Structure formats: C-alpha cells, structure tokens
Image (cartoon, rainbow, N blue to C red):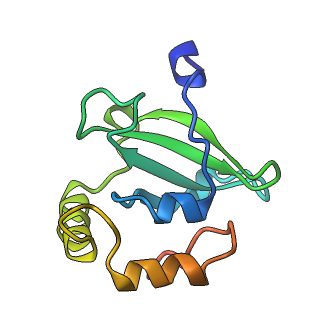
C-alpha cells in the first residue's frame, strides 16, 4: 500500500459518519471480503486525502479492531456511483437547516443509533 494512503485516517464510529453533513458512499466488499474481518467499504467525499474537494477517499472497516482502514482514492478504486452521490447530496440538503445543523429527522437518527455496525444496504442480503 502506498505510504500516502496508509497515512490517511478516518477517526470515527459509524454513528459519527452517519451524522456528518455529507453522508458517505458505502457498500459491501463482495468477493473481496476477508471474512469476518473486512466486509464493508466507505468512501467519504471531500476527505483530506482525496484529490479535490468533491473527490472521494475510501476506507474498509475492520470489524475486529472497529476502525476504518485506508484503502485509496475513489479516482483509482471507482466504487462511487456518481449519479447516486448527486442524489444523496440533494437529499441531504433537505435534511439540514440552512446553517448546516441537522433537521429533526436526522437528529432523531443520532439519538436512536447506538451501534457501530454499518446500516444494511438496500437490496443486499
């Protein structure tokens, strides 16, 4: 792994990530999974390690250590569905007040979510 990638970090829990102003792109690793340790990826838009403010940087979640492990820029991994990311941003704008604070529905999510387990992907079983 490239040293610039291994220096990247995402010091957060799943709840922290979900409550951010911008929701990440997430998905299952499928055939790349290393069960039971690595099963899910997350790409965060605008992460400091991404190349550009609207670029994504990706991590895999280590289920044993409960930490995000840097994987690389989405410009190389090509995990993020760009139209879905645009739709997610549009939806997020409806969930936040103009000052960037969460609207009521999103605040409730934070109070009800106490697990560090990632949410299930719709349509994946």
Task: Indicate the position of residue 31 as horizontal and vertical percent values.
Answer: 60, 55
Answer with left or right where residue 2 lies relative to residue 36. left
Q: Nearer the viewer, residue 24 or 20?
A: 20
Eyeballing the image, is 16 above or below 49?
below
* Residue 45 appears in the rendering: yes
* Residue 125 appears in the rendering: no
Task: Indicate the position of residue 49 as horizontal and vertical percent values.
Answer: 42, 28
Circle count: 0
Residue at the top extreme? 3
Task: Indicate the position of residue 36 as horizontal and vertical percent values.
Answer: 79, 59
Eyeballing the image, is 123 above or below 84?
below
Q: Quadrant of the C terminus?
A: bottom right
Give the quadrant of residue 35: bottom right
Residue at the right extreme? 64
Q: Nearer the viewer, residue 88 or 74?
A: 88
Give the quadrant of residue 68: top right
Q: Residue at x 63, y 56 (%)?
A: 13
Task: Indicate the position of residue 55 as horizontal and vertical percent values.
Answer: 28, 38
Q: Residue at x 54, y 27 (%)?
A: 8
Q: Residue at x 28, y 56 (%)?
A: 81
Q: Nearer the viewer, residue 20 or 27?
A: 20
Q: Quadrant of the N terminus?
A: top right
Q: Residue at x 54, y 35 (%)?
A: 71
Answer with left or right where residue 34 lies relative to residue 100. right
Answer with left or right where residue 70 lies relative to residue 77. right
């Amino acid at each position: 792994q490239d040293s610039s990638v291994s220096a990247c970090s995402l010091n957060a829990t799943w709840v922290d990530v979900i409550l951010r102003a911008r929701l990440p792109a997430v998905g299952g690793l499928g055939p790349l999974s290393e069960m039971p340790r690595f099963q899910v990826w997350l790409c965060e838009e605008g992460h400091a390690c991404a190349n550009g403010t609207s670029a994504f940087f990706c991590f895999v979640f280590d289920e044993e250590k409960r930490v995000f492990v840097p994987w690389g820029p989405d410009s190389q991994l090509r995990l993020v569905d760009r139209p879905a990311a645009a739709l997610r941003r549009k939806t997020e704008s409806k969930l936040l007040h103009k000052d960037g604070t969460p609207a009521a529905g999103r605040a409730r999510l934070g109070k009800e979510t106490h697990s560090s387990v990632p949410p299930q992907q719709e349509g994946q079983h």
